[in-house]
Image (spheres, rainbow, N blue to C red):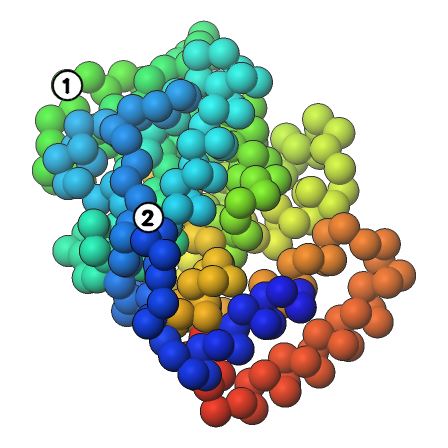
Amino acid sequence: MWIALLAALPSCAAVGLFTDGTSVSLGSYNHGRLRHGARLPQKGEGYLCPPLWQERKNNYATDELIKALRHAAARVRREYPGALLGIGDLSSRGGGRSIFHHSHENGRDADLIYYAVDEHGRAVAPVSAMPRYLIAEGQAKAPSPSQHGASFSDFSPRWFDLRRNWALVRALLEEPSIEIQYLFIHNRLRDRLLAYAQSQGESADLIDRARELMRQPRDSLPHDDHLHVRIFCAPGDRALGCVDRGPLWWLKKHYKYMLPRSAERALDEVVDRLTAVIAALPCARVWL
């Protein structure tokens, strides 16, 4: 908590003047830029970018997000040999506005294609489409070309893969290089994943965190066709002008899921008071 606070204070003096060549996320997810963005290779351990998204070249993000995606995909593949995550749009090379999204502007958003299985429960590879899981049993609806402007000749019947999709959520939540702000997902799919996690004996704290961060967005499509990951600004980026929109969970992230619940109440009071003090600073508008 104190490290994040100290890293943010220099923004009062200079915004965006200092960088060591690593990625810098500037502005907000829907009004921002990306400096020195890291590029996600089109294929790696446990993942690939289908041809449709390779052509768009929106495969840039912050160093932290690229690292986290690669770690998460590799972890799921180790847990479930043969698992292959489809990765769609991140941000363009320099960030900024996109004709495909109202976000994805500063390297902190990523679209992940849900893992799927065939009618026999065998893993199927991602294709150049994001099929919607509309049926209660989790079967995907075959996409139409108008959805993405591409041919879907390689599409085959598929079902939502509870095991691998939960493994992906768990890997992202436990990845130390990032702090998740949101995992946008349809409520129905969210509920199925949480029920599966409980049936597998996952820890109550992990399930509580997943329940809090997996949300169906209110101002966009319901995300029944992909998982949208958004991370908080890294402390160093926040000091240079990265803006977190939404709850200031980053002030609490260092203890919320690690300390006994009896200690949380007292720390909550301290953090809330500290947040009020920070918000009153003249420079607060730069990074709050």
Q: Disc 2 and disc 1: Cα gap in Å?
A: 30 Å
> Looking at the image, is mark 2 or mark 1 nearer the viewer?
2
Callout 2–callout 1 Cβ contact below 8 Å:
no
Q: In terms of secondary structure, where does tag 2 sit?
A: strand
Q: In the depicted view, which residue is nearer to us: 51 or 61?
A: 61
Q: In terms of secondary structure, where does tag 1 sit?
A: loop
Residue 140 position, x and y percent, is 35, 28
Q: Is residue 119 visible?
A: yes
Q: Is residue 225 above or below residue 13?
A: above
Q: Quadrant of residue 102?
A: bottom left
Q: Residues within 10 Å of mark 1 (few under 14, many from 20)?
A: few
Tag 1: amino acid:
Ser
Q: Where does label 1 land, which residue?
A: 153
Q: Give left or right: position of 92 versus 111.
A: left
Q: Which mark is residue 61?
A: 2
The residue depicted at 30 percent of the width and 36 percent of the height is: 40
Residue 243 position, x and y percent, is 41, 70
Quadrant for the N terminus, please.
bottom right
Residue 208 position, x and y percent, is 69, 49
Tag 2: amino acid:
Ala
Q: Residues within 10 Å of mark 2 (few under 14, many from 20)?
A: many
The residue depicted at 63 percent of the width and 87 percent of the height is: 277
Which is more N-terminal, label 1 or label 2? 2
Q: Quadrant of residue 46?
A: top left
Residue 79 position, x and y percent, is 57, 18
Q: Which mark is residue 117?
A: none
Q: Is residue 78 above or below residue 133?
A: above
The residue depicted at 33 percent of the width and 29 percent of the height is: 86
Q: Quadrant of residue 271?
A: bottom right
